[in-house]
Amino acid sequence: MEDGLVSEDDILLCSEKEFHDAAKRNDTERMQELIRRGVDIKVKNKMDRKALHWAAGAGSERALRLLLEHDLEVDDMDSFGMNALLLAAWFGHLSVLKMLVSIGAKLTCENKNGLNLLHCAAQRGHIVILQYIMEELENVQINKRDKSGKTALHLASEHGHMEAVGFLIAVGCAHNLKDKQENTALHLAAKEGYSHVLQKILENGVNVDERNVDGMSALHLASEGAHYECIRVLLEAACDVNALTLNKRSALHLAAQHGTGREVRLLIEAGINLDSVDTQHISAVHLAVLNNSTEIVKGLIDAGCDLDIVDNRLQTALHIAAEHGRLNIAEMILISGVNLNLLDKENVLSDSDTSLGSNTTFKQDHHQDTQHIRGVLWKLASKHLKADESYKEHGHRMLLIWLHGVITARENPTKSLFQGLMGISRNDLAESMRQLANSDPSSGKNCSAM
């Protein structure tokens, strides 16, 4: 049978591919048969991987012994810089690792990312490999860094291997070192959500408020990742709950943007500043509204956040809710009490002044005395907003919410509507709506603003 290529995309002959597969599954009988047929045992695939690599990575001891009788180039690397020794450590094959060490494999090898034996074992959490390296091998640099600046402890922490973390700390691995992003092991555990690893590291007296290159503490990273248990552990360790990043964001900003109500409540209970603003003068409630998180907005309102804070665009939370069509949130904000006369940079009103306490239920008005003005608002929404039907419906609903606030504040809705339209330079529409509103003879609240 002709021994062709495995496929057009491959560089191995079928017999060579079969030899690699036999090495992986520890089938020495088939390997010997193929060797007798003249297969090149050192042949490499597209990833520069040969049978020795496959046997080491798979823990195929018999296959490895057979290969070592013919191929002593044990330090050959594949396209990722992984050799047989690193593959054995990566996949946790202690007996294979010992075999390779015994025949003189290079112990100071590294892959293309700078990972050495200790790094590979730590990242994968292979405690028996770590123990062997530290107890049996000489001149181990326990705090050696990979190309991203990470030590074995960084890698074990980042991947959630608590037993490995405990072992590395016990044998003297420095736990306050920073990688190239200035993250400590604590940062990485918090970022990935490994609360049990956080607890283990904290038991060894690290600085809980250490900052990385972005000014972020472990609490910031835990909040950004919505890792509730990590936030709880860090708060119990007395971290600075009001710490700010380089762009002046607090953990509450990050939880409001990326988390759920659980994380926000936890931070609020810890006494975090509800009204802290970042470099764009954005508060947590701005972000919660922008992300349409009704639960978080309600939690912040109930905790007493300032709804009248304006960002660099001079927008309040209500402006943002109106701009993005967050109807339920707009209702909640209106009924919670805001200054509705604030203008943003486009001179758009958020609405009118009202103060209704903490009730967040909006009931549509069906009173007879507001029937005419409600008709005016419907005409405004249906005739003068964009053609899309849902846009009209949302616009009408927002106008009804606005009307609710105006009436509650005992203001003249016709006059407020007129002034609002004039404020956005829709003079013709303002006059048209004023005349329509004033055409109701039963209303005593005509607009005489002209």
Image (cartoon, rainbow, N blue to C red):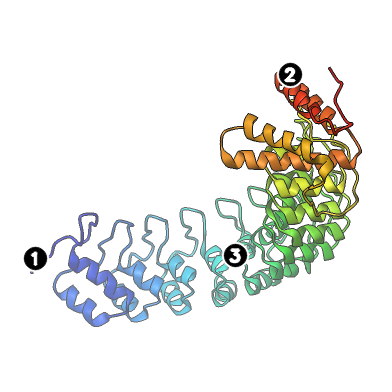
Query: In this picture, is 78 found above or below 65?
Result: above
Q: Which of 171 and 225 is in front in this view?
A: 225
Viewed as shown, does residue 96 lie left or right of 189? left
| Residue 258 appears in the picture as rendered | yes
Residue 195: name its quadrant.
Answer: bottom right
Q: What element carries label 3?
A: loop
Mark 1 / mark 3, whichever is N-terminal: 1
**Amino acid marked by disc 1:** Glu
Farthest left residue? 1
| Residue 317 appears in the picture as rendered | no
Residue occupying image coordinates x 72% and y 22%: 432
Query: In this picture, is 328 found above or below 231?
Result: above
Query: In this picture, is 276 found above or below 45?
Result: above
Q: Tell us which disc is closer to us: 3 or 2.
A: 2
Residue occupying image coordinates x 35% and y 73%: 55
Viewed as shown, does residue 217 lie left or right of 27? right
Mark 2 / mark 1, whichever is N-terminal: 1
Q: How far apart are marks 3 and 2 (CA)?
A: 62 Å
The label shown at residue 365 is none
Q: What element carries label 1?
A: loop
The residue wearing badge 2 is 427
User: How many numbered marks are there?
Assistant: 3
The residue wearing badge 3 is 159
Q: Nearer the viewer, residue 399 or 70?
A: 399
Q: Residue 197, percent across and down?
A: 69, 68
**Amino acid marked by disc 2:** Asn
Residue 369: name its quadrant.
Answer: top right
Q: How far apart are marks 1 and 3 (CA)?
A: 47 Å
Which quadrant holds the C terminus?
top right
The residue wearing badge 1 is 2
Q: Residue 191, percent across and down?
A: 67, 58
